[in-house]
Structures are given as structure tokens and as C-alpha cells.
Amino acid sequence: MVPSRKREILANFYLLLKQSFRREHMVQFYASELGITPKHLSVITKELTGKPAIELIQNVLVEEAKCLLRQGLSIGEIAKQLHFSDQSFLENSLSEM
């Protein structure tokens, strides 16, 4: 059984991710907000979900980008809304999915 503290951290990470993913893409931000190290956050997410924290963040970003694409926004507009400094990074992320 997974200790309740780890489940609590994961739940809080998901809440924070839902609130902040459009502007915050780094594991360090989320770990800092949760009062733990980035490595500890990734260990917990990997243990409980099978994926490291950075992959969970990227998955949320890609899903949002796909949703915005379906709404007719251009890659440039999506990159701006999701605070990507490099539009080609977003294009590569979408093509990998």
C-alpha cells in the first residue's frame, strides 16, 4: 500500500499542474511549490503513475495543444498561449504524439 503522504503529494501535484501548466513547464516549479525536491517529486510520480513528473507535465501540455488545434488556433498562437519560447519545440512535441 502506498503511504498516504505520497498520495497527497501526487494529488497536490495534479491540482497545481491543472492550475499552472499554461505558464509553468518545469518540474522545479512544482516541486518547490510542494516543498520537496524535483527528484523526490519525480520518484513519487514514477512510483504511483509509472511516469516521471516531466512526462506528466508534457502530456498535459500536448493534450491542451491538441484541444486548441481542434479549435482552429495556429501553432504560433498555441505556443504563445502555452508560454513556449520556441514554437518548434511545440511542433516536435505534437508530432511525437
Image (cartoon, grey):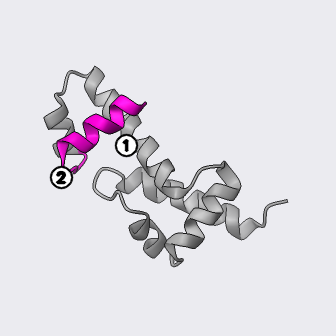
Looking at the image, which residue sits at the far right? Answer: 1
Q: Which residue is mark 1?
A: 61
Q: Residue at x 59, y 72 (%)?
A: 40
- Tell me which amino acid carries mark 2: Ser
Dominant secondary structure, magenta: helix
Query: Considering depth in this image, is 50 or 19 the residue closer to the camera?
Result: 50
Query: Is residue 86 in the magenta section?
Result: yes
Q: Which SS class for mark 1?
A: helix
Q: Residue at x 14, y 36 (%)?
A: 76
* Viewport quadrant of the C terminus: top left
Where residue 63 appears, x then y in whole percent?
A: 40, 34
Where residue 34 appears, x then y in whole percent?
A: 50, 72
Q: Where 3 falls versus 92 (above or below)?
A: below
Real-space CA distance between mark 2 and mark 1, rounded to the nearest whole angstrom: 14 Å
Name the side, left or right, on which 75 lies relative to 7: left
- Residue range of the region highlighted in magenta in the rendering: 82-97
Q: Which residue is mark 2?
A: 85
Query: Is residue 24 in the magenta section?
Result: no
Name the side, left or right, on which 18 lies relative to 23: right
Camera-nearest label, 2 or 1 = 2
